[in-house]
Amino acid sequence: MGKKKHQRFAENCTFSHVFQPSYLDMVTNGFPLKSAWHTFFKNKNPITLELGCGKGEYTVSLAQIHPQRNYIGLDIKGARFWKGAKYAQEHRLHNVAFIRTRIDQINHFFSSHDNIEEIWITFPDPQLRESKEKKRLTSPIFLNRYRQFAKPGTIVHLKTDSVELYQYTLEVIEEAKLQTINKSRNIDADYVNHPVLAIQTHYESIWRKQGKPIHYLAFVL
């Protein structure tokens, strides 16, 4: 592991808004903020999750745009979201938290008491091989996981460069008879100067430089 990663892991441990429980501890003792996130944020404002948050661009940007809401980014790569966690610390964003975990363990962290009503999935691994379908973050398996803690009517947003994942998610939505709020195969053409969709992740900037159109879906869970 590089020196920079060691430094970032060490600094994450000093942030009060970063949580990195071991799997064994989580399973044995449970996560203390499950059903009690209001005690961390010191309010009962609605919570938005960013799944596979990478460097946390959406988490911190949305927190600044909507200070009346709380935002939690989740990713297995702590050295990545260090950037967002550091930004939140330096800018005193008290409505931000980060969790180091795999997304398939998400139900250890939240319950229906946590006022979660929005989910962002930003440029996830599309897991294109058919054998990997169960790992897609918009698969029926994952949508059912989200339903276990999300409020009825929770809105799920997907941004992706993968036309395959976009089309797959449309099919999942249609089969489950879920309400589609917005859809676009090219947000630059359909949502000019949209303040939220204009936020760019690290990976989005890479795909844009390659000339790839950015796809977007929003639907009710």
Image (cartoon, rainbow, N blue to C red):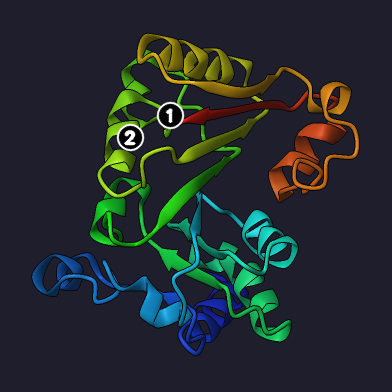
Residue type at the position of mark 2: Phe
The residue wearing badge 2 is: 142
From this view, report whether residue 76 is shown above or below residue 68.
Answer: above
At x 30%, y 45%, the residue is 104
Q: Position of residue 51 (x, y in %)?
A: 48, 49
The residue wearing badge 1 is: 138
Q: Quadrant of residue 85?
A: bottom right
At x 31%, y 52%, the residue is 106
Lateral position of residue 99 relative to residue 163, left or right:
left
From this view, report whether residue 201 is shown above or below residue 210.
Answer: below
Image quarter hosting the C terminus? top left
Lateral position of residue 56 relative to residue 146, left or right:
right
Tags 1 and 2 touching, CB below 8 Å:
yes
Q: Position of residue 80 (x, y in %)?
A: 58, 62
Which residue is nearer to you in this view: 75 or 96? 96
Which residue is nearer to you in this view: 86 or 72? 72
Cα distance in 3D space between marks 1 and 2: 6 Å
From this view, report whether residue 200 is shown above or below residue 66.
Answer: above
From this view, report whether residue 5 is shown above or below residue 169.
Answer: below
Look at the numbered disc 1 and give the secondary structure of its residue.
loop
Q: Position of residue 152 (x, y in %)?
A: 36, 40
Residue type at the position of mark 1: Thr
Q: Residues within 10 Å of mark 1 (few under 14, many from 20)?
A: many
